[in-house]
Image: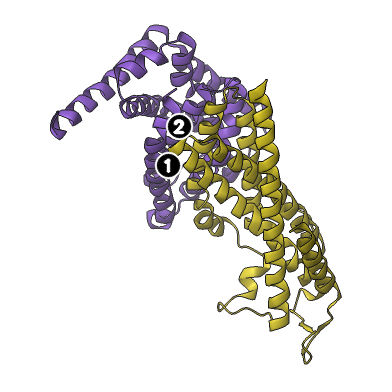
Chain colours: A purple, B yellow
Amino acid sequence: MLSTKRLTYVWLKSATAVFAKDCRSELRTRYAISALVMFILTTISIMLFAIGSEGATADVLSAMLWVVIFFAAMSGLSRTFVAEEERGTAMTLQLLTTPSAVYSGKLLFNTLLIVAVNLLTVTVYSAVMAGFVVKTYSIFILTVVLGSLGLAVASTIIAAIIAKANTKGTLYPVLAFPILLPLLLTVINATRLAVEGAFFGEAIGEFQVLVSYIAAVGTTSYIVFDYIWKD
Amino acid sequence: MKIVLGIWISVVIVLGFSLPMVAQPEHWYELPVIPGLEDKARIIFFHVPTAWLSVVAFVSSMVYGIRYLRKKNPDDDIKSASAASLGFMFCILATVTGAIWAKFSWGTYWNWDPRQTSIFVLLLIYGAYFALRSAVDVEEKRASLAAVYSIIAAVTMPFFMFIMPRILASLHPEPILNVQGKVHMNTTMLIVFLASLTGFTGLYLWMWHLNVRTQRITLIRIDKK
């Protein structure tokens, strides 16, 4: 019988092993990262052409930033689970380790991916959108960090569901949108506050919603993942 | 069962439309006039039960989903899916009746009032639920994936209650009616309203039962083939 301490150690080790495996396979193919970067660049340039010389208001631009981020997440984050099914390696993972370790490893990988992608998006977006000037940096940075975490948590569990369905690509945004809507509305509101130059205290309510959203969805996903993962 | 329900709901419909609305109700058959709503307040007898049932159906679908995950009994999945399909229907009814009422009270069918946004999201969740169900072939897999999806959706729904008021103030009557938590209905109106709620809930349970029985027979026939 293994002691609790030993079990925790084994679990941590397998979770980091899953994470390391995903990182390594991503670095070898650079599939997700290159697709995501190109997606962001094309979307932002389409927006630039569409807006042209008209100049959109700060309100619209802070909403559009999250539209770009949402669809970027939709195009890249399902990869971790879908790839396992396509390569036929899901069964191996099931045999080798526990569902909770798989979930934690995948969640960690998706979080890293979305944080990296969002950093790029925010930098490029602020650089090229003349009307988008952040006045309260503390609100903006915290919003981007918490927003990325929330996106990763919610889209990882939806990705796990999608990987078991027949129509993998088209269904992902359909399933994810209603789940992500509370998060999106909150981050858009917080970004608008940051652009308007509100005080940090005014956005506390938004951060409370974001933190509780991450906690609620994260805990539920962790509990129900077993039922998705086991065949 | 269905005859009792038919009579019950007919009586509710007749009462709901025919009882006069007066400023100072004196007789037992008179309903109070609600300022700003007048005759349009009659929608409460039909719109509120449909909205209530779309939530009840969603919750019962989730509860049977959880039961399926625990016991893996296909019958629970049938119950869960039937509840969801009825809930979808009541959700559409609530949206449409609400939109028609909004046209006459607010002057537009749709203005993204918090209530309208919430019901729109509920519609989206139902739509996604059925899209997911149709995309999985294996029955056991379909049942557990659908159950998991409805659990996650149910966890995120309460957030709208906190988020929506921060974005837009609601014009929906209920908060206006209950500013100090008191109901501006007299006894007659309350009785008709509760009778309607009971009648519609009975209708839902009857349809659900019928739906479950039909699906069970289909399942047995598929098994025999």
Q: Residues within 10 Å of mark 2 (few under 14, many from 20)?
A: many
**Left or right of B15: which side holds A129?**
left
The x and y percentages for residue A70 are: 53, 32
Q: Nearer the viewer, residue B59 or B181?
A: B59
The quadrant of the picture occupied by the C terminus of chain B is top right
Residue bearing the label numbered 1: A217
Q: Residue at x 78, y 64 (%)?
A: B9
Q: Is residue B76 above or below residue B225?
A: below
**Is there CB contact under 8 Å for labels 1 and 2?**
yes
What secondary structure is marked by label 2?
helix
Residue bearing the label numbered 2: A157
| Chain at numbered mark 1 | A
| Chain at numbered mark 2 | A
**Left or right of B48: which side holds A115?**
left
Q: CA distance from mark 1 to mark 2?
A: 9 Å
Q: Residue at x 64, y 31 (%)?
A: B131
Q: Nearer the viewer, residue A200 or B81?
A: B81
Residue extending furthest toward the top = A28
The x and y percentages for residue A60 are: 60, 42
Q: Is residue B193 above or below residue B118?
A: below
Whether residue A54 appears in this view of the structure is no
The quadrant of the picture occupied by the N terminus of chain B is bottom right
Q: Residues within 10 Å of mark 1 (few under 14, many from 20)?
A: many
N-term-proximal mark, 1 vs 2: 2
**Left or right of B9: which side holds A43?**
left
Q: Callout 1, which amino acid? A: Val
